[in-house]
Image (cartoon, helix red, strand yellow):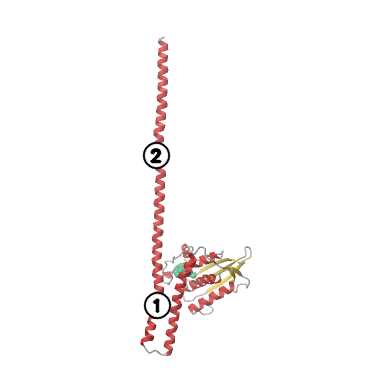
Amino acid sequence: MRRRKTAIFFLVLGIALSILTVALNVGWILLNLREVVLLIIGIIFFALITTGIILNTIFLVREIRRSEQHDAFLNSVTHELKTPIASIKLYLETLKTRDVTPEKRDEFYNVMLADTDRLLQTVEQVLNAGRAGEKRRQMNPTEVGIGAVLNDSIAAVRTRYNLDDDVIRITEPAADLKVLGNEEDLRTAFVNLLDNAVKYSGGEKRITIRTKRTKLNNKVDIFIRDNGIGIPSTELKRVFKRFHRVADEAAKNTKGTGLGLAIVRAFIERHGGRVRADSKGEGRGTTFIVQLPLI
Ligand code: ADP
């Protein structure tokens, strides 16, 4: 009887201890689980907050940069508009108030015409930038000869800068190089590239244009090479962004709006093409390579 009682006691004790152990274990697990869950939630929130802060900072830095570029753009456009207007006004006032010789008058007219061209160029550049931004623009494509477009563009830039014939040289492209697209947009793109090649070159300018047909995929590569100030490797991609201008001493001294290459890229890509810049570095010239699909 005693043994039984003792057995029951130990049995109850065993069961009680087992229950206690299980309760303790489960409790311990539950308690820690809460902590683990809290830890995981904490880590997730921490990661989310950190990502949020990083994204926010990137966004702010970009916005600040963009706003600075907008300011620089507004300043340069205002300057590009104001300078020729001020000059024309001065010449008109002189013509009105003074007796000038016929030769001088002719000279004044020529300066005023050049100033008007400069004004028109700036306005056209801004208008083109607006057109470049239009996503769904109707192109009304026609067959365009690459040779003719390049020759027209060279002629326009030669007149604009009064250049000798041998400053811009072209190896005659094959006559059958034709693309499907808008002739005016293509001319605008090449004039912008040639204009830059002249603008960002020093005294002895040498600009060459070479075309190379890629037989494999029926495309044409057009190389526009200058011997100018060059572009640092870190800037080769960025120069195509709207308003972006290289901040080097050499580039800073040249007037511009930062729109030209963005227009070039938009117009070339609209023709199914691509454009990139290549340069061995500062002072070592630049080559722009335009690739267009042929008909
Ligand atoms: P803009 O000439 O009006 O500043 P662009 O968009 O045409 O604007 O060019 C962007 C920048 O790229 C220029 O400010 C200049 O720093 C650089 N760049 C363009 N073309 C050349 C070139 N041929 N040689 C050297 N730098 C160039």
Say how many tags the image has: 2
Residue visible at 38% across and 66% down in the picture: 71
- 254 to the left or right of 223: left
Give the residue drawn at x 40%, y 36%.
34
Q: Nearer the viewer, residue 294 or 154?
A: 294
Query: Which of the 4 image quadrants contains residue 171?
Result: bottom right
- Quadrant occupied by the C terminus: bottom right
For the question of whether residue 230 can be seen, the reply is no
Q: Give me the disc on residue 126.
A: none
Figure check: 93 above or below 176: below
Q: Earlier in the sequence, mark 2 or mark 1?
A: 2
Residue hosting label 1: 85
- The answer to whether residue 164 is left or right of residue 295 is left
Residue depicted at x 45% and y 83%? 110
Q: Is residue 193 left or right of residue 91?
A: right
Circles 2 and 1: CB distance less than 8 Å? no
The answer, for residue 53, to whether it is visible in the render is yes
Label for residue 38? 2
Some atom of ligand 1 lies within 8 Å of the CB belonging to the residue at label 1: no
The amino acid sitting under disc 2 is: Leu
The 10 Å Cα crowd at callout 2, few under 14, some 14 to 19, many 20 or more, is few
Residue 14 in percent (x, y) is at 42, 20
Which residue type does callout 1 highlight?
Ile
Dot 1: element: helix
Which of these two is toward me, 34 or 290?
A: 34
Identity of the residue drawn at 48% across and 77% down: 160
Residue 197 in percent (x, y) is at 49, 72
Residue 121 coordinates in the image, percent (x, y)? 46, 74
Give the label, 2 or 1, closer to the camera: 1
